[in-house]
Amino acid sequence: MRFASLGSGSEGNALLVEASEGASTTRILLDCGFSMREVERRLTARAIDVASLDAIVITHEHADHIGSALSLARKYRIPLIMSWGTGQAVKVHATLKGEDDAALVRWCRADERFAVGGIELRPYTVPHDAREPLQFVFSDGARRLGVLTDAGCATAHLVAALGGCDALVLECNHDRDMLANSKYPPSLKARIGGTYGHLANDSAAEILGAIDRVKLQRVICAHLSEQNNTPELAMAAMSAVIGSQSTEILVATQAGGFDWLTC
C-alpha cells in the first residue's frame, strides 16, 4: 500500500491511497478540497488518471475537504462515500438529482468497516465542528495507514483507532503561542484552538505519545497553518515523542502535499 498527498492545509486537502495485488489496483481519494481542474492537475502530476479512482471518500463537509467532490464524482462516475450527516450538510441529493447520479453516493458509519476493492476502511469519530465528521484507517490486510486531521482534541476512541498503524498522517495545525499572537479575530482563535477545532502541535504530540507505535514507520505532519505554525515546530513536537525510535517524520505542504510513500 502506498499513499500521496495532493495538498494539505486550510486551502485544500486530498490524500490518495493505493493498494495493488497482482494485476489489480485499488485507488481511493480521501477528501477532494480543490477545484476540479486543480484536482485533475495534481493527480496528473502523480501520474494518476482521475477515471482510475475507485472511490472518493469525504471526511466532512468543510470546503477545504469536500471541494469539487460532487462534480468530480458526476463527471467521472466515481462512487462518493461519506457519512449521512455530511451528506445532509452539503445537500448531496439536491446536487446529484438524477437517479444515475444519486446512485453514486454511498453512506458509511463510525466503526463499521467497509471495503473498496483491495482496501478496507475503518471510519472513526472525531471532535470537530461539522455535522458528522469521520476520519479513517486504511488497510490492505498487511499494512495500516491512519489519518487524523480536523480534530480539536484527543479522545480515547481515536487513540485506540490509530494504534498499531504502520504510517500516520497526523494534523499539526498550529502552535499555541503563534495562534494567540496572530492577527486572527478572537472568535476565530477560539474556534481553531477549541475542543472542536484543530489540533495544536502539543495535542498532536499527546496523541502520538498515547497510541501504540510498535509498527509505526513514519508520521507525516499535516494540515499545518501557514500563518500559525512552521514545519520546524511541528517536527520538533513529533521528535520529542519519537525520541530514538527509528520513525521517519515528514511534513505535508499546502502547495504540493507529499510524494508517494509506502506503509
Image (cartoon, helix red, strand yellow):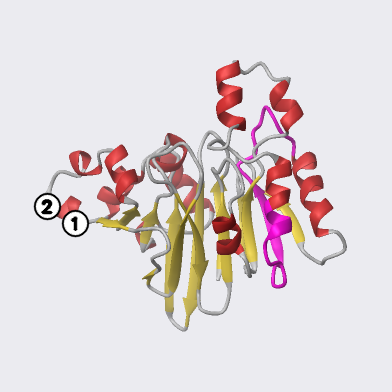
Q: Is residue 206 visible in the rendered structure shown here?
A: yes
Which quadrant: the N terminus? bottom right
Characterize the local packing of mark 1: few (<14), some (14-19) or many (20 or more) Cα atoms within 10 angstroms. some
* Residue 8 percent across, percent down from the top left: 57, 43
Q: Quadrant of residue 67?
A: top left
**Residue 98 appears left or right of 47:** left
Drawn side of residue 81 relative to residue 225, left or right: left
Query: In the picture, which quadrant includes the C terminus?
Result: bottom right
Residue 61 image position (x, y, % from top left): 39, 40
In the foreground, 128 or 141: 128
Dot 1: element: loop
Provide the residue span drawn in magenta: 207-230
Q: Is residue 200 left or right of residue 135?
A: right
Q: Residues within 10 Å of mark 2 (few under 14, many from 20)?
A: few
* Residue at the image position 31 percent from the left and 38 percent from the top: 89
Using the image as rendered, state which of residue 83 and residue 101 is in the foreground.
83
Total numbered labels: 2
Name the residue that disc number 1 marks. 103
Whether label 1 touches label 2, CB < 8 Å: yes
Please name the amino acid that badge 2 sits on. Answer: Glu
Where is residue 2? Give x, y as percent.
57, 67
* Residue named by callout 2: 99
Is residue 192 covered in magenta? no
Residue at image coords 40%, 68%: 113
